[in-house]
Amino acid sequence: MQFAINWDYRCPFARNMHEHLITALADGADYQVDFIPFSLNQVHIEEGEPDVWSNPARYNELLAVMTGMTVQRFFPEQFGATHLALFAARHDRALDITDWTVLASILESHGVEPEKVRDLIESEGILADFKRLHLGSVEEHHVFGVPTFFVNEQAAFVRVMHRPNGDAKVARATIDRVLDTMTNYPEFNEFKYTSIPR
C-alpha cells in the first residue's frame, strides 16, 4: 500500500499516529510511505506577519521538523527511532525542541552525527523543501493540520486517541483501518465523536 502522511512534532495526535506507523513498519508492514512535513507555526501566524520560512526569528521553530526531514532523507535506517524520539522529547519529556542542543542530544543517542545533520540542513535546501512540501499540500489538498493521510489523490485528517505501546498488531490494525476507510469508503467525509469518554 502506497500513501503519504504529514507531521509536525508539536502535535500529540501526530505522535500517536506516527507511533502506530513506525511500529507497524518495524514489524514488517508492507507500506510504501512518504513523510510530508507540515508547520503548525505557519498555520497559526497572524495576518500581516511574514511566513515562518521568511522570518529569521522563527527559524528555530522549524528546526525539529527539518532535523526529521534530514534524517529521513540521508540516514533512513535511523529515521524510525529518531522520529519517535523527537516526538517523545516534546510530549513525554517536555523538552524544548526549538533548542539545537536538545535535538543534537537526540541525534547522538540514535547514532547520527548532529553537526552532519546541521550542515545538511544548510547545504541541501531543507528549509526550501519544507516550505514547498507544506504549501503544496495546502494548495492541492487544503490541508490544515496533522496527521493527514494522502491516499489515491485524497487527503484525510485522522486523529486516534490511543498509542500502540509497542504492540505491532494494534499498530497495523490502526493504520490498516485508516487506509481501508479512505480506499473503500470515500463517502465518509467526517466522523467525529461529540465527546471523549474519560
Image (cartoon, rainbow, N blue to C red):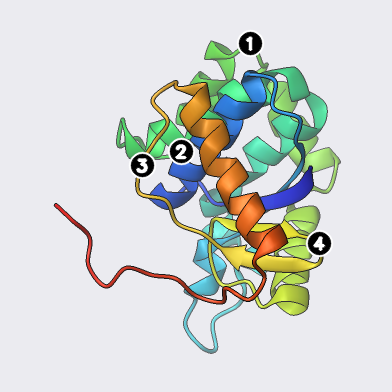
Name the amino acid type tagged 4.
Asn
Name the amino acid type tagged 1.
Gly
Q: Are marks 3 and 1 in contact (CB under 8 Å)?
A: no
Q: Residue at x 75, y 58 (%)?
A: 151
Measure the C-alpha gap from mark 2 to mark 3.
Answer: 28 Å
| Residue ranking furthest to the left | 198
Q: Residues within 10 Å of mark 4 (few under 14, many from 20)?
A: few
Q: Residues within 10 Å of mark 1 (few under 14, many from 20)?
A: few
Please identify, in this view, whether the residue under mark 2 or under mark 1 is nearer the observer.
Answer: 1
> Label 3: which residue?
162
Name the amino acid type tagged 3.
His
Measure the C-alpha gap from mark 3 to mark 1.
Answer: 29 Å
> Label 1: which residue?
111
Measure the C-alpha gap from mark 2 to mark 4.
Answer: 37 Å
Does 85 sit above or below residue 121? Answer: above
Name the amino acid type tagged 2.
Asp
**Going from the N terminus, do you reach mark 4 or mark 1 first?**
1
Circle count: 4
Please identify, in this view, whether the residue under mark 2 or under mark 4 is nearer the observer.
Answer: 4
